Amino acid sequence: MPLLIAGVVLLIAPLYVSAFWLQLGFTISALAVGAIGLNLLTGTTGQLSLAHPFFMGVGALAYVVLSGESQETSLGPIIGLGLPPLLGMIGGVLLAGLAGLLFSPVSARLQGIYLGVSSLALVFIGLHVLNTVSPLSGGFNGRSTPAFEVLGLRFDHSDNPVTILGVPFGRAELLWYLGIVLLVLAYWFARNLLKSRPGRAMKLVADSQLAASVMGVPVMQYKGKVFFASSVYAGLAGVMYALAIGSIAPQSFGMDLSMQFLAMIVIGGLGSVGGAIAGAAFVTSLPLVIQNLSEYIPFVSNSPGGMSASHLASYIYGAAVILVLIFKPSGLAGIWESAVRLTKRRRPGTDKTHTARRGRADVQDPTN
């Protein structure tokens, strides 16, 4: 029932919510897809990776090159192949997966801090490429993201938008639904993967690689395959993120994004697919919520003597990471599960049922 209510709310939200919050919702969907992929890699399989922004950058860059148009600018020519945006999205996802596949031999042989440092090198390589390969990326200023289009429906501003119940469905509304569809598919695939035999093998690899090897799990192969799957998720997240922010400026795929992804999966709950979505929503929306409430928070101000909303948000989810690691390692997902169990225990009639069962057991036990 709660899922049905949530689904209805998400479907009718564009009829009542402003474009700003719809845009934020699509951004959350994009980063949640990336967080799910990183949680499969780090939370489930135990491979520490900081390279997610690199694979997101690969997906975003591939999309704008494949679906964008060639043009001349003051900084030089910009290359674009002009393919349909859906093909551009698929190409971006596949190229990000290919990049992950090329790096998978390294990820399969390293673990812990060594894998984290080596993956961090990819982020710096990606930033250098985005800054220097101007004909593809547009250089330091980046380049605009071509609008997404499928079945003749263009996800962009239009002079004659589709109107439903008096509400014009423009770019923000259409991207909202695109984000829901892609996030649901990403969630469904990850959940089914974790319930399958490969998912159980992934968890075993995280617990003990030696035990996994003894039980016949090809550890190196699984680590490489999971890195590939995580890169595919990151590539899709990169395409969605480029659509959300409207450009592929290099600074959008730097170290800050790596730290935010780690905060998402830790706060949400390592190894939890739903927790990754909750963590992404918390980390992404917190600065904007604080910005909207800044008039009620005395020390939050854009003046030189005040603290910006983004800085305060960083402090808050940094503190949240520490509190989660100390008091609730399972994160928001664990808090939700505990709340559900507590609700079931307090459900009316539950105590009577337990009492009746115990009474029957007492009658059947001759020692009582």
Image (cartoon, rainbow, N blue to C red):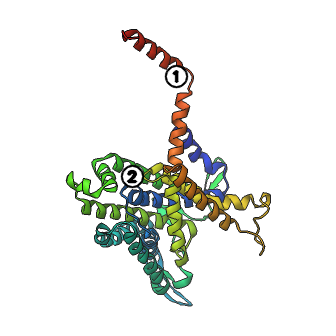
Q: How many marks?
A: 2
Q: CA distance from mark 2 to mark 1?
A: 34 Å
Which corner quadrant of the image does residue 288 belong to? bottom right
Q: Earlier in the sequence, mark 2 or mark 1?
A: 2
* Number of the label disc, if any, that sits on residue 338: none
Relative to residue 116, is residue 346 drawn left or right?
A: right
What residue is shown at x 49% (from left), y 62% (from top)?
262
What kind of residue is marked 2? Ala
Judging depth in this view, the residue of 364 and 23 nearest the camera is 364
- Up the image or down, 367 lies above or below 195; here it is above
x, y percent for residue 142: 54, 80
Which corner quadrant of the image does residue 244 belong to? bottom right
- Up the image or down, 22 lies above or below 98; here it is above
Q: Quadrant of the C terminus?
A: top left
* Number of the label disc, if any, that sits on residue 190: 2
Question: Is residue 19 among the parts visible in the rendering?
Answer: no
Judging depth in this view, the residue of 274 and 166 nearest the camera is 274
Reading the image, the residue beneath label 1 is: 350
Judging depth in this view, the residue of 54 and 335 nearest the camera is 335
x, y percent for residue 272: 44, 50
Q: Residues within 10 Å of mark 1 (few under 14, many from 20)?
A: few
Question: Is residue 300 among the parts visible in the rendering?
Answer: yes
Relative to residue 42, is residue 344 drawn left or right?
A: right
Circle 1 SS class: helix
Relative to residue 22, is residue 214 drawn left or right?
A: left
What residue is shown at x 45% (from left), y 85% (from top)?
133
What residue is shown at x 38% (from left), y 75% (from top)?
118
Circle 2 SS class: helix
